Amino acid sequence: MADAVRERLRDYPLPYCIQGSAAPAFKGEVNTGVHFDCPCGHRLIEHFDPDAFVRVAIKCFGCAAVSETPSLPLGEILPRTLVTLGADGGYLLGSTVIARAGVAMTCDQEIARSLADTAPRMAGHPSFELSIGGLDRMEAQYDALIGGRLASQQRSLSRYPLDDPAGVLEFPFAWATAHLRKTLLCGSVDLSKAETATALAWIEAFRHVTSIWGHHPRFALTASTLAASFLHTVPQLIVAAYLYEAGNRVGLATSGEKGTPIPDLYVRQRVGEIFHIEVKAPKALHWCPSKSLSVWEISKAVISALENSRHQINSKRKGVLVISSSLMHPDIPDVVEAELNRVLKSRGRNRSGVAAIVSISPVSAGLTKRPEGLELGTTYAFRVSKNPHFVGENPVDTGE
């Protein structure tokens, strides 16, 4: 029997710990009252927390079988405070190892699986072809994601006067594709026109987020909100990709209990510690025809977004507020940032659970001629304003 077990372990697909005595291999520092046992009944982990032991394999002292703790739920992210056993090999534990609170243990295979599921796939996507056929394909994709409601949105949009602000902001995707169709049929794509530049930016942003996040197990749930909140959901996914590229594992939130507001994104700092990210997209900060915006209106929108985030970000659920804008002008990021700093200085004490406010806004949209057609490209600016009144050590790193 012992020889057979050794032969099986030689090809075991994960690194594993070898329980070296009758005592548990691990003991959680936090008393959970839950334990992880071998099928033979021998105790492997005392005070077990599934978030702290993620796909950890342990060879039992009693029967020599190997048991694995569960993998992460589909779409879940690992915490930043993490210890890995590597990719292979056996580790003899002569006595019980105390697992420190807040630290997760896993293996390289689980890290790779989680990243494959939850990290944005930034490379290898075809560019959007600005043509009638390209718009047809984009509309079909959007329609599938929102449950076949595009035709209804188009009919509702048609009841508004041409380029009416209310219609544009209520049905931004339907308006953008309709505007670009009309532009293509006229034979001229003029990016100096705010309407055309914004329509291109919105369509390109949709193409971008569906390309990089479409594989995510929770993408369908997030994308289902596009019909009602396109100008919120798209920036939410752009921000998530930005944070991932900056070295943060970012989770897409699942739906909470009915009637309970939950933040859009989150980062798991340590086991049991979640840092929340709430995205707000004030209508005042989204372009609409014939609208110019004053500094006073920007300030009002920032204050409103800060107040409206109380249920998602607060002293019990600390995090970052993200304010999204569609105003495409190179000066807008600096103007918004100045208002963020001013508002946080004057009002941040009352929102001490908000670590920072991040603004995101497009600064340019461009077209590049390719053999297959015109390629769209949009550049975004991110600004981070830390709350000087945040309680505790501020986890937001601005690189300063």
Image (spheres, rainbow, N blue to C red):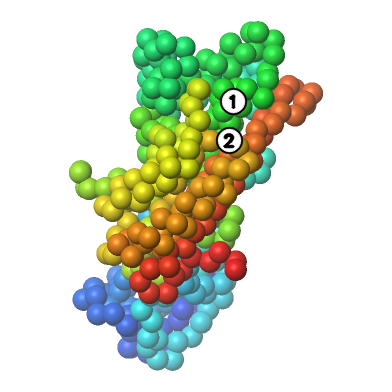
Q: Which residue is mark 2?
A: 328
Mark 2: which secondary structure?
Answer: loop
Residue 365, image x, y percentages: 65, 33
Point 53% across, 78% down: residue:
90
Point 72% across, 24% down: residue:
374
> Which mark identifies residue 178?
none
Residue 347 appears in the figure: yes
Front position in the image: 123 or 83? 123
Please report contact status of discs 2 and 1: CB closer than 8 Å, yes or no.
Answer: yes
- Mark 1, Cα crowd under 10 Å, few <14 / some 14-19 / many 20+, is some
Q: CA distance from mark 2 to mark 1?
A: 8 Å
Q: Which residue is mark 1?
A: 194
Front position in the image: 279 or 143? 279
The C terminus, quarter of image: bottom right
First in sequence: mark 2 vs mark 1? 1
Mark 1: which secondary structure?
Answer: helix
Point 67% across, 25% down: residue:
192
Name the kind of residue labelled 2 in the image: Met
Q: Is residue 133 left or right of residue 164?
A: right
The N terminus, quarter of image: bottom left
Please determine whether, in this image, residue 277 is positioned above or below residue 233: below
Q: Is residue 209 left or right of residue 47?
A: right
Name the kind of residue labelled 1 in the image: Ala
Residue 394, image x, y percentages: 44, 70
Residue 341, image x, y percentages: 47, 58
Residue 305 appears in the figure: no
Quadrant hosting residue 298: top left
- Mark 2, Cα crowd under 10 Å, few <14 / some 14-19 / many 20+, is many
Quadrant hosting residue 229: top left
Front position in the image: 254 or 264? 264
Quadrant hosting residue 217: top left
